[in-house]
Amino acid sequence: GLADQQERSDGGRQRRAYGVEPLRTYMNDPERATLARVEYDYLVNELSRAVGLGGRPRRSGSISERARSNVTRTLRYALAKIVEHHPTLTTHLEHALHTGTYCSYMPDPTNPVVWQSEA
């Protein structure tokens, strides 16, 4: 909407204000230069999330697309944690878990899984 357009144009002015020239003013002060660079990178990242190609507003995804993305991201995070303790299980799950419109667990039928629990 109009507020989003105003925010994007203000962000463009901020990005230019924090551009290379202001960073050069800190060349003799490494600590301030580092802080300025971190702030600049943060602003550029935030603006790039909000603005698409050619400065057009980025469309927000549908509810189902956001849900799919969240499930996929959560599974990747969980697998990254599982691999630390059980690499074989991680490999199995990477091949058997499928995400998309529907999520499913489909192990390879030619390689049956025998689950064992350690009590």
Image (cartoon, helix red, strand yellow):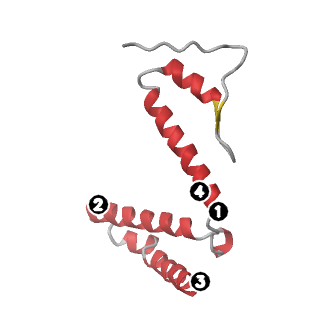
Foreground of the two, 50 or 68: 68
Foreground of the two, 35 or 74: 74
Kindly check if marks 4 and 3 are in contact, taking CB atoms under 8 A apart as contact.
no
**What distance separates the C-alpha of mark 4 from that of mark 3?**
21 Å
Q: Which residue is mark 2?
A: 30
The extreme right residue here reads: 110
Which badge, 3 or 1, is on the more N-terminal residue?
Answer: 3
Secondary structure under badge 4?
helix
Relative placement, left or right, of 119 versus 2 is left
**What distance separates the C-alpha of mark 1 from that of mark 2?**
44 Å
Image x and y of residue 47, in percent: 52, 70
Mark 3 against mark 1, which lies toward the viewer?
1
Q: Write the residue at 32% across / 63% down.
A: 35
Secondary structure under badge 3?
loop
Secondary structure under badge 2?
helix
Foreground of the two, 1 or 9: 1
Q: Amino acid under label 1?
A: Ser
Which badge, 4 or 3, is on the more N-terminal residue?
Answer: 3
Residue 20 vertical position relative to residue 70 in the rendered view, above or below? below
Image x and y of residue 91, in percent: 57, 23
Q: Which residue is mark 1?
A: 62
- In the rendered structure, find residue 66 and report the number of the disc placed on it: 4
Which badge, 2 or 4, is on the more N-terminal residue?
Answer: 2
Residue 60 vertical position relative to residue 1 in the rendered view, above or below? above
Q: Amino acid under label 3?
A: Gly
Q: Amino acid under label 2?
A: Pro
Q: Write the residue at 41% across / 22% down.
A: 85
- Quarter of the picture containing the C terminus is top left
Q: Which residue is mark 3?
A: 1
Kindly check if marks 1 and 2 are in contact, taking CB atoms under 8 A apart as contact.
no
Secondary structure under badge 1?
loop
